[in-house]
Amino acid sequence: MENGKPGQEFKSLSAQFKLIHNPSKVAMWTHTTPLPDWAYKQQEINGNKNVAQSSNVWYVDEIPSIPADSPRLVREVRQVKTMPFLKKWFEVQRAMFHHNNALTSSHPYASQPFHWPFLLRGVSFWTHNDTRSQIYFLGNPVGWWLASSLLAVYVGIIAADQLSLRRGADALDI
């Protein structure tokens, strides 16, 4: 089971797993597009030697042998947990950093560090043409300016300490 704990129960819709052939160290993998009509739109299964790749992960979508009136098919409604603001903020920062670094060549959605403090450009994250709705990601100038100013203060303190040490006084001596 992928990211499972020892002794954890397997749950068909929520658990993810990899099928690995141990003697050859090859994981089961498939393309995202089905085969043509002559193959009845089935999936072609292949082996992937890179077992760490995320496209090797599978999950159980349905179990045809379970009767339609089985209590196992009844799903409990789960409450959505609230997430603290800082956790959301760090998640968005991490996601934006990860996706920007995943771009391997020049791309219209890529941004450079000098764009961030001045909000020179954002990223069109989602659009819906029928209703003309969109989500447009902007950088976080408050976080950028705060981090930059704290870094500048730190460098200033270190520079002042080094200058005072050259003059024979230890300014940071406690």
Image: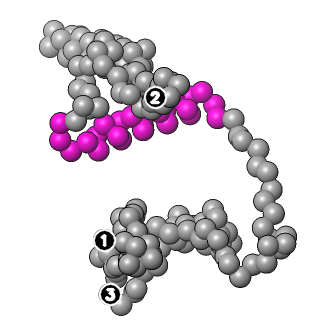
Q: Identify the residue under disc 1.
A: 50
In magenta, the rendered stretch is 83-106
* Residue at the extreme front: 38
Indicate the quadrant containing the N terminus: top left, top right, bottom left or bottom right.
Answer: bottom right
Q: Could you tell me the amino acid type at mark 3?
A: Ser
**Tag of residue 21:** none
Q: Could you tell me the amino acid type at mark 1?
A: Asn
Q: Identify the residue under disc 3.
A: 24
Quarter-wise, where is residue 144 in the image?
top left
**Residue at 76 percent of width and 44 percent of height:** 79
**Front in this rendered view, residue 66 or 164:** 66
Q: Could you tell me the amino acid type at mark 2?
A: Asn
* Residue at the extreme bottom: 23
**Residue at 17 percent of width and 41 percent of height:** 105
Q: Position of residue 85 (x, y in %)?
A: 60, 27
Residue 91 is a magenta residue: yes
**Front in this rendered view, residue 118 or 155:** 118
Residue 130 is a magenta residue: no
**Image check: 133 left or right of 69?**
left
Q: Nearer the viewer, mark 2 or mark 1?
A: 2
Quarter-wise, where is residue 24 in the image?
bottom left
> In terms of secondary structure, what is the magenta stretch mainly?
helix
Separation of residues labelled 2 and 3 (CA atoms): 49 Å
Separation of residues labelled 2 and 1 (CA atoms): 39 Å
Indicate the quadrant containing the C terminus: top left, top right, bottom left or bottom right.
Answer: top left
Q: Position of residue 91 (x, y in %)?
A: 49, 36
As drawn, 141 above or below 98: above
**Residue at 56 percent of width and 33 percent of height:** 87
As drawn, 56 above or below 89: below
Q: Identify the residue under disc 2.
A: 129
Q: Report helix, strand or loop for mark 2.
A: loop
Q: Report helix, strand or loop for mark 1.
A: loop
